[in-house]
Amino acid sequence: MTAGDRGARRRRRAIILGAGGRDFHNFNTVYRDDPSYEVVAFTAAQIPDIENRIYPPELAGPLYPDGVPIYPQEDLERLVGEEAIDEVNLAYSDLSHAEVMHIASRALAAGADFRLIGPRETMLPSSRPVISVCAVRTGCGKSALTRYIARVLRDQGLRVAVVRHPMPYGDLRKQAVQRFAALEDLDRFECTIEEREEYEPHLVAGDLVFAGVDYAAVLRRAEAEADVILWDGGNNDFPFFRPDLEIVAADPHRPGHETAYYPGEANLLRAGVVVLTKVDTADPASIRAVEANVRAANPRAAIVHAAMPLTLDKPEAVRGKRVLVIEDGPTLTHGGMAYGAGTIAAKRYGAAEIVDPRPYAFGSIRPVFEKFPHLGPVLPAMGYNEAQVRDLEATVRAVPADAVIVASPEDLRRLIALDKPAVRVGYEVEETGGRPLMRLLREFAAARMAGL
């Protein structure tokens, strides 16, 4: 085949299935500058109201002067047929292996090939050492673990930049590169509750945080201010940067999930260190089961046990009271948990009753319970847009409770007016057994300091 023949060949037409994060990164690193491909559309799932936008031409590059449209994933079959799609790329996370193959079957039946792009093609190299913190499921305690690691590294004299997995739910042009150094930056970037849940605890702990859409540009900004890059993963996705040390969290409250979800199992198989979190609240038999599964899947990984002890700022407001429990949103929704830290705290500190919020759900909160019927009598901290924040506020006001237990990492009192006493749940990582992570991190830091 001559060069002229290759130039005349039709570009391979692709759709990227995503959720406003990995999909854009796959496009930027694999498709954007490849003239043999034409990405016709993105589709959006998991996150409400992020479809019907445009991935802007300023980020899409010269091959896409009009940008790339974003449709609901429900349009997949229609798009494959109407747009003569050759390839469907799945680019979001925390799906059971069965769910992945159901999506693949839809793409194949519609007439397209199905593709999963792995870490090697999408991980960016860094001029700084990189530690990644990922997980086998959403809600394993990655962010608390990341904060612990950042503290250990800072204590060793290293400047740390935490780079968070993307959550670009607003204006993508404004969110291309984000730097968070103070709580005021959360307002400046108009962050959703879900973004604040991830960024705010880091900022309170003194961490410098970066995020965005174009992670090559994000990485350059972070490298300019840090000795070590600390990747704080989202869902159970694998890292966007090439790590020197891969740490993966596993949750003994969900035994068996460590090998049953995409791409969390890939993280488990790649890990250098696996941290079993929440061992202080998990059933001992479940802890043993998860550890056995980890050893069978990845015998070379160091295994660390870590507690995540719960604290309440006003425990006296819980004992003997009827309480509404607000939990971390993503942990409950696509993380599949029926409860979280707030429920455990309510029971431990003697609440008389956990009031079921479902009969009082208002507006856009009501369909959340319909979509996720596994939820227990808890309220997910949903706030992907201003209207949903107001619906959350109205739901809280409608629930007949004496107090509100706020287990979202975000201090919701900053965003909604609570008409009941609020009790905040805190949780941080404490090592309890296995190979000490602190020693591994100190060895890592000493090697890096020697090279500075």
Image: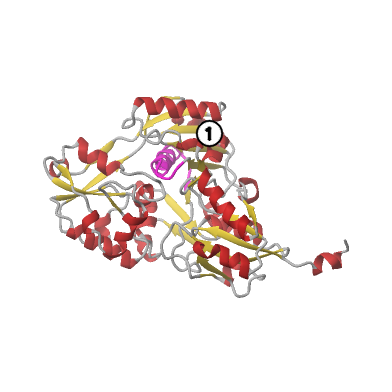
Relative placement, left or right, of 3 versus 193 is right
Identify the residue position indicated by label 1 in the image.
444
On the question of residue 309 being in view, the answer is yes
Q: Residue furthest left?
A: 320
Q: Amino acid at mark 1?
A: Phe
Relative placement, left or right, of 20 versus 326 is right
Which residue is more in the foreground, 79 or 304?
A: 79
**Label tally:** 1
Secondary structure under tag 1 reads: helix
From the top left corner, tell me how far across and down residue 279 is, in percent: 36, 30
Q: Quadrant of the C terminus?
A: top right
Q: Quadrant of the N terminus?
A: bottom right
For label 1, the crowd category at 10 Å Cα-Cα, with few meaning under 14, some 14 to 19 and many 20 or more, is some
Query: Measuring 34% from the left and 31% from the top, which residue is drawn there?
Result: 282
From the top left corner, tell me how far across and down residue 420 is, in percent: 15, 55
Q: Vertically, is 298 above or below 328?
A: above
From the top left corner, tell me how far across and down residue 375 is, in percent: 31, 48
On the question of residue 441 being in view, the answer is no
Judge whether residue 27 is colored magenta: no
Which residue is more in the foreground, 287 or 76?
A: 76
Q: Vertically, is 384 above or below 275?
A: below
- Stretch of the chain drawn in magenta: 137-161
Which residue is more in the foreground, 93 or 174?
A: 93
From the top left corner, tell me how far across and down residue 379 is, in percent: 27, 52
Query: Measuring 80% from the left and 67% from the top, which residue is drawn there?
Result: 7
